[in-house]
Image (spheres, helix red, strand yellow):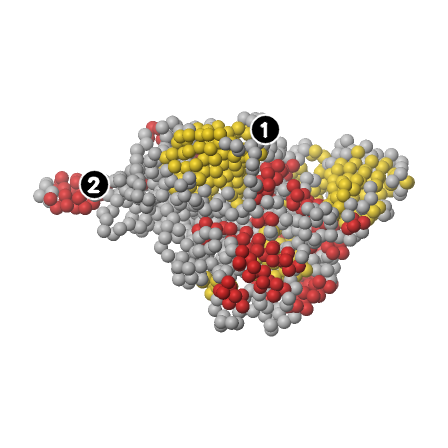
Amino acid sequence: MVSYKRLDPENVRFSNAALLGESALTQENESVRDPEECERPLIPPRPACSATTGLLVLGSLLLVLCAGWLLATMFWLHKVPSDQPHKPPTPSSANRTDAQGSKEQILSVTVPNPQACAVIAESWRFDCYPESRAVVTREMCEARGCCFIPVSSSSTSSSSSSPSGRHGIPWCFYPEGFGSYSLVSVNDTALGEEGRLVRDTKTYYPGDIMTLHLEIRHETNTRLRVRITDPSNSRFEVPITVPNATTKADSPTYSVELSKEPFGLIVKRLSTGTVLLNTTVAPLFYADQFLQFSSSLPSRFIYGLGEHRSTFLHNIQWTTLTMWARDVPPVEMTNLYGAHPFYLAMEEGGDAHGFFLLNSNAMDVALQPAPALTWRTIGGILDFYVFLGPDPSSVVSQYLEVIGSPAMPVYWALGYHLCRWGYDSSNATWDVVKSMRNYGIPQDVQWNDIDYMQRFMDFTYDPSRFSTLPELVKDLHFHGQRYVMILDPGISSTEPAGSYSPYDEGLKRGVFINDSDGNTLIGKVWPGLTAYPDFSSDVTHEWWYDNLKRFHEKVAFDGLWIDMNEPSNFLDGSTNGCPSSSLEDPPYTPGILGGLLRSKTLCATAQQKISVHYNVHSLYGLMEAKASASALQRIAGKRPFVISRSSFPSQGMYSGHWLGDNRSQWKDLYASIAGIMTFNLLGIPLVGADICGFGEEPQEEMCVRWTQLGAFYPFTRNHNGIDMKPQDPTAFSPLARTAMKQALLLRYSLFPILYTLFHHAHVQGHTVARPLMFEFPGDVKTYGIDRQFLWGKGLLVTPVVDPGVDYVVGYFPAGLWYDYYTGDSVPSKGEELRLQAPLDKINLHLREGVIIPTQRPNITLWVSSGQPLHLVSALSEDGSASGDLFWDDGESIDTYETNQYAYIVFDVTQNVMTSQVLRSHLEATYITVESASFYGVKAEPDRVLVNSQDAAFTYRANQQVLTVSELGLNLSQNFTISWM
């Protein structure tokens, strides 16, 4: 066969190593075989039965010949011992008949030429034996027809010293010419091309689909879609709504080349010739429960692929990222709460592209330093998109055009949220709220964890300890504050019949997930034995709404915190275990924590309306969020507020996300920056981490620094665990409390710009918390930065993330920057600068050319959002700047879509600021512009005019800052401010 094409590997060094840790170790089950059959070794020898008979017949041979014969037999019968965690699937034997009655072809195994194997560069070796913890021998490897070259630990990373090369250079890898599919026909279609792929020989995984249908859709000029499906049988497809293109792109910015034998796709950027996708580098696998393809990457700069604890820039030095939603506190190299098979990659010259595999099954994504990556999933179809950008922001916008743009949040979602697990009572919760008010510390939302429930049961509250909960909520509303409660999906199944209506009604309406026998699957979480709602069913959505509505009549909550929705289970599978099945123990299990698909969740064989749990597990959080957002909207008639732990692409349409059960450690503080930036490019901008940490006791200094950083999370919540000391701002010393209060007031003063950024996220698919490289894609130095970030395009946040320091080093891309607080100019050639950072300060800088609207802060956004505006203009060298403001009532649904909003743009050119109202609305008439500051005014003006009338002003010559106060301008009317 034709040798696989591959790009020449770049001689590059990865400069930003990710946070490394031990991968979750998995265990693959032994293949099931008939005990009456003779055991088949990997390389088919003479049948063992015949060998035994031969031994008896030849018993009279000379001892030395007998011994030699036995040694040879042992060699032929070599296999993985039964106590090994993995055994490769048994190859198909000749003339074996499948379920459809057709004869399968024999697996043709040819031991590759050692010399041909040796010439394959180590960085381009694609793993032929990816099973976790498999101790791969030469015989095992060559039984798959692959190259076997052990690699010494000195020539690879320290994490790859295991005999199999796991998480290092693979010892067992594909030779050139390894069997794959051939493209036997191709035809033009209205949207692109379609073709027929055929495989001649079976692979070493069962259930090969020998003929495939290829469909290439040129959907837009910057979006390519490729689908590879089984033309004979329907397979599970992810049930999210994606655009249905009807016409072919007329001027695509990409080209698609097809390799016929072996089949492969090569996608190039037309403007530069850069190869974005090249699947000819390794063979395509498409079996019933094992789908795999590989591609080269144009650079080592790759981002996304959530949800994992890592640096923002992924480490491609033999890193495997596993996706399968799992309840586990964030640790490195482990599959976490959500699954997001999307990456963004940077190219030479600053271009960017994205790749999205629309697949919800358990999968591994293996990165290697070629640079290249391999997608390895155990179900569904291959349905993927390539987004051409060409800049990072455009890539994200194009991705969100497919999965859906994030919802516009209700205004109070952007305030300060306070929670803890361990409020003993509603009165104890109330006391904290009152203390926050007494100290004048901003707070918009009070939360309760599972403490409020009666025996941890959903839709209940403890009648003794939380008897005053309804009154607490009324008091919050009276003060312009809101209340959010937690709900877990597990519904108690052990209450006496007729005493707990959520379960009783759920049984009657058939809303719960069933086991493989059709009975309600019972697991265990906080209430004890529980049933799990099947949120893939519309009937369940209605049942969820009914229960929420009834509880809302008792406690008028404002939002929902949906936790434990991976879904989590204290058992593995169910109280009855899980049946023996290829769904429970597939031929290949990705590197999930616990090694089993059912580990601390439901059986893979569990039955849901749209499919078995095997296919929809990682969709559970998305489906619950959709049901919750819909219910809240129906109950309140306003924008819903939902925060979910588990997530999947399109989640941002229904909920925000928090980064899970972190710890009160400095490294968790630092890691949260990468987390919020990653989720912004994954389409969930309403994201944050538990400020001060959830587990372990917080240090005062760390909590101050974390509150300062958290004030710039898009979603800002302080939350800690049970039995931990209080860590709300009132629990600390006066100095620390004051520093936290200042940070939160600073956030509230910036509400107008934050709200406007969320509008752009909702309408245009922009990020809110933005990596520096998004604004400076031509500056390679920004590609690995995850200790700083931007709000929008121009507000640079440089937090302290290390203990015991009063300074911080930050990178400033080339250009002119201004200290946000003073207006001092900070010119940069693209360099790191040391900044003073006393305990009560977080460094903020404005980028030249931006205008941001700010507001006089108060202790709630209900009050703050009605205060006068102050406009801050950071002038570029030529004296220009621009900005905008989106304003509405803050809570009505679809205000943009129904034109119920105001939109104002600000511009400074040649010493004249103009405010132009592009759309007016009643809400804007309530707001005035009180003052304006201009950073970078090089000479003191003689005169300032406001709407052609003289106005008083001040000028600070040292900072070159011009300030005009007492303006009293109505936001809903155009105005000008000029100086001369």
What is the crowding at mark 2: few (fewer than 14 residues within 10 Å), some, or many (at least 20)?
A: few
Above or below, 138 against 644 in this view is above
Mark 2 and mark 1 residues within 8 Å of each other at the beta carbon = no
Q: Nearer the viewer, residue 372 or 558?
A: 558
Q: Earlier in the sequence, mark 2 or mark 1?
A: 2
Q: Residue 152 location, x and y as percent? A: 38, 37
In the displayed structure image, the side of residue 728 where residue 819 appears, left or right: right
Under tag 2, what secondary structure? loop
Q: Which mark is residue 545?
A: none
What is the crowding at mark 1: few (fewer than 14 residues within 10 Å), some, or many (at least 20)?
A: few
Give me the residue at 36% from left, 28% from top. Answer: 1
Q: Which residue is mark 1?
A: 251
In the displayed structure image, the side of residue 781 where residue 112 appears, left or right: left
Q: Nearer the viewer, residue 865 or 196?
A: 196
Under tag 1, what secondary structure? loop
Q: Amino acid at mark 1?
A: Ser
Give me the residue at 59% from left, 38% from top. Answer: 398
Q: Quadrant of the C terminus?
A: top right
Q: Residue 186 location, x and y as percent? A: 44, 30
Image quadrant in which you'd find residue 66: top left
Q: Which residue is mark 2?
A: 46
Q: Is residue 582 visible?
A: yes
Q: Amino acid at mark 2?
A: Arg
